[in-house]
Amino acid sequence: MAKSAIYLLILAALSPWLYDRYQAISTVVANRPGKFRGLYNIKSHEIKFQDQIRNCEDVIIEDGIAFLSCDPGRDRWNTVMGTFAPEDRERRGTDGGDIWIYDYSRPDLPDSEALKRLSLSDYADPVDFHPLGIEFDAATSTLYVINHSRYSGSVIEVFQVSVESAVAKHVQTFKHPLVNTPNSIHSLGDGKLLVTNDHYMRAAVSPVLSKIETFSGISGGSVVYTDIHNPNDTRVVARVPFANGIAMFNSTTVAVASSSLPGIYFYTIDLDHRLALQRYVRTPVGVDNLSVDSDGKLLVAGHPFAFSLMKVSKGRPNCVLDGNEAEKKACECSAPSWAAEWSEKEGLKELYKNSSEEFCSSSTVVRDVNRNVGIISGLYEKGVFVFRE
């Protein structure tokens, strides 16, 4: 009798976790190859710059300019997915990433003029630049970039940007023990940041434990508040399973994406930058990055079938675009894409779904409402997906 009671108590304690895992597995099964169906709640689209950029993880827009965080070196070095292939010394220079600026405000501009690479001024080793999440403080023209460096570890690079001259002057490198697996950034102004850590256990330390953390839905990821001018004022303000994208939904609410417990966490932020959980909204895919448009809609991009993305990541170290047949095949991408919007009034509305034939591995969606332009980036895709509604 006593044993039965203990078993019942254990089952009761595990029930919420088991239900969450059931829900997560159900979404993956529903999105498996052959079952995932395309959707277009957009009027027109084109894929631009396929011959110029690839592996663009994050996008932010500011007054007709899109900043694109792109890293061809993600094929061989992806600290989130656990890809740690040695640097290809024979092809040194292909392993580094870049920040690009795309002027989408003038449709008449030829592509050669609309897209420019930001020149990194006073930056020590551009080959070891592996950008992931980015954030731009327009008031001070400051660009924050999460850099998953091979040799310095994961850090936040700070640049002063001149869009007109396409130059980013390196100001400082910020590193802190609590910012150990940084993924996404939101600027609160004047060097104050909210940063997500996607895992507690880094894949570089233990690939097995990192994967267990991912698939168990354990709240190992975190949101950290920090001030680059006062590093001592750095603290964990929330715990989130596989914390990914972060955005300020409104003046008092922060939205945080979860990739392993598919959905979005909403927090109230107080004057001391502490976060209090408001609600959780489940999504049909593992969410990657978040953004908010001028209409107050939360834009959400994510990965419908994690196993396809893992397969792409595993094969990418062999990718050589101008190589032999096997090397070119390793450059292919078979991970589906998904983008949606969410609002309190209308809930979740899917904008775009594709099984990967057209555009794969969606990681970010942004939208300029006034210009009726939206952009989707792909973690392992060539170019960017530009749409109108």
Image (cartoon, grey):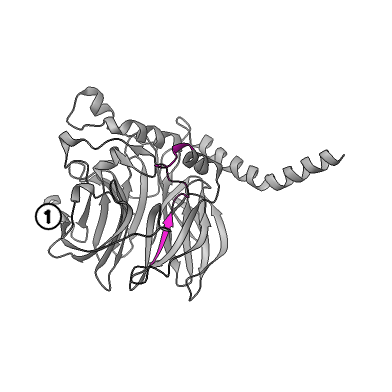
* CA neighbours of label 1 inside 10 A, class few (<14), some (14 to 19), many (20+): few
Q: Tag count in the figure? A: 1
Considering every residue shown, the one lying at the far top of the view is 325
Considering every residue shown, the one lying at the far right of the view is 1
- The residue nearer to you, when weighing 246 against 49, is 246
Considering every residue shown, the one lying at the far bottom of the view is 271
Can residue 91 be spotted in the picture? Answer: yes
Where is 100 relative to 353, above or below?
below
Q: Left of 110 or right of it: where is 212?
A: right
Mark 1 element type: helix
- The residue nearer to you, when weighing 34 against 124, is 124
Q: Left of 317 or right of it: where is 262?
A: right
- Where's the N terminus, which quadrant? top right
Can residue 374 be spotted in the picture? Answer: no
The quadrant holding residue 367 is bottom left
The quadrant holding residue 78 is top left
Q: Residue 175's spot in the image, x, y percent? A: 34, 59
- Where's the C terminus, which quadrant? bottom left
The residue under label 1 is: 113
- Seen at 15% across and 50% down, the residue is 111
- Seen at 48% across and 50% down, the residue is 200
Q: Residue 375's spot in the image, x, y percent? A: 30, 53
The magenta segment? 193-208
Where is 17 relative to 34, above or below?
below
Residue type marked 1:
Glu
The quadrant holding residue 85 is top left
Q: Left of 361 or right of it: where is 329?
A: left
Q: Residue 171's spot in the image, x, y percent? A: 22, 65
